Image (spheres, coloured by chain):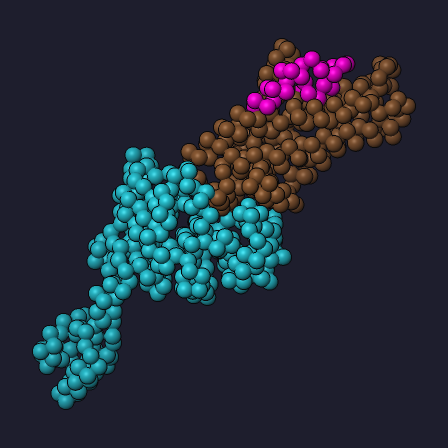
Amino acid sequence: MIVSTENLSKEYDGIYRVNDLDIQINEGDIYGFLGPNGAGKSTTMKMLLGLVKPSKGSIEIMGKSFNEKNRQEILKSVGSLIESPSYYGHLTGGENMEIIRRLLGLPRKNIEEAVHIVRMEKQMNKKVKNYSLGMKQRLGIAMALARRPKLLVLDEPTNGLDPAGIEEMRELVKTLPTKYGMTVMISSHILSEVDQMATVVGIINHGELIFQENMSVLDAQRQPYIILRTSDNNLSCQILRNMNPLRTGDGLQLGALSDEQTGKAVQNLCANDIAVYRVEEHRESLEDIFLNLTGKEMTL
Amino acid sequence: MLINAIRAENLKSRHSNMWVAVAVLPLLTAAIGAIIYGINASVSLYDGDMWQQLWLQTGLFYGYFFFPILIAICASFLWRLEHINHNWNCLMTTPIPQSVIFIAKLVVLAKSIFTAQALLMIFIIIVGKVGFRFEQPIPIGMLWWLFMGWFSALGVAAVQLYLSMKIRSFAVPVGLAVCLCIAGLACYITGLGSMFPYSQLILGLSSQEKTLPIDSLTTLVPMVVFYIVFFILLASRRLKKIDIVAG
């Protein structure tokens, strides 16, 4: 277990913004930390980094209790990008990296490698104030990677990025555990974004962890289903009644069908002079699961 | 670790506008000193030690106001770097002790103060030698003005650095420095100069006395050290306790 919290809570003005969180992150996980804006994601991540002091509960990182005594030892192996990237705008990207190198007493090789991973080699002589947001994010990640962390904590790293930047970030995060042996905790309020890269998902709402599960378990639960749209949906329902169809607004929904079963169903309808307009396979998305859990939609 | 942190702080302050203030304020001080000296010299008020007379005029506003305000401006510049662009997050997730963060900044501030002092002494020599053609040799006491002026300002540096760390605004700590200068002046006049940072600095510069205040060293030096240590501890305690809010 690389991160483990017990009853982790933070109170602001008498209200618990984060309440009794028991987060468990194993080595090599990409832990997708999801929740609407204001759910307590940033506060939780800041507590894991010692930036915010918990009101109650405990944090263990790499088997060490996070306290003043272990703070330095833990932070040596934890890289992070919280809220927005940190940078000194009046300095170049290279100088910003050099500050990190000096502060952490790292060899130059680490910096070169980190800059290479985020593909920023050509931007190192430019002042950071002239960077685009995407470049600042990548520089921020390079700063976090420079110490070759065992744990990387990324708070909404795709915020403000264009679609290409988001895709690039996703690909980068996916490679970190396998290529560099890192564990990644990444937060987002966009569920579909995490759906594509996380191996474990934790969902926080109103400061409470309402869901924490392996993606593989989740995938097993998320059975695909078939939606049919035909020229006569009511008649189609009758014809396919042994498949227990569900009449939806403009079609009918069948359960998880094999290719053969799907073929037979279509054949059957055609034989009864019903035109089949659409055969679509759907899968429950994280949004659907979240909706089921909270009974409301997660806003962007 | 401290050396690494100081080297990082040195790099952060590169290309900083702080250095403009460090160059301009001594220049302004020397210019004002030269003007006042020139006006008084034209009515032949001076005799004896011309360098001391020039320092008396130059150091008057410098010690009372310009120098502490310069320190306040530099301290605000140093923390402004962290107050903007979410740099608090990066700084506080670095595996270095909180006290080292503060001390490293204090060392860079001390360096900038020393640069300002050295520049002022150079400007004074130019004013004396080139402007007023002093024939008297450059006094050895100038080394006292330089070094003791610098050392006795470190208490103010520690206070201002703490204030600028705590207060996100650039201007508020500078404004507070002006108020504290007035308090410092009051302490200096009432003979409590070595007790309060903003008057320790006046005492250390010793521009307003004919002889160097050597006998006050026994109280001045320990009190300056006390303020430095006290504010390092206070800053370190604060950084350990507060929740970091980066902006």
Dividing the image into 4 quarters, which one contains the C terminus of chain A? Answer: bottom left
Q: Is residue A250 above or below residue B66?
A: below
State the residue at coordinates (57%, 26%).
B228
Question: Is residue A101 toward the left or the right of residue B212 in the image?
Answer: left
Q: Is residue B225 magenta?
A: yes
Residue A90 lies left or right of residue B25; in this view the side is: left
The chain letter corresponding to cyan is A
In the picture, one chain is brown; tell me its letter. B
Q: How many marks?
A: 0
State whether residue B148 appears in this view: yes
Magenta stretch prevailing secondary structure: helix
Give the residues drawn in magenta, as a range. Answer: B202-227
Q: Is residue A296 above or below residue A216?
A: above
Q: Position of residue B202 (x, y in %)?
A: 67, 20
Magenta span has B247?
no
Q: Which residue is farthest front?
A: A63
Identity of the residue drawn at 86% across and 14% down: B47
Question: Picture coordinates of residue B165 (x, y %)?
Answer: 52, 34
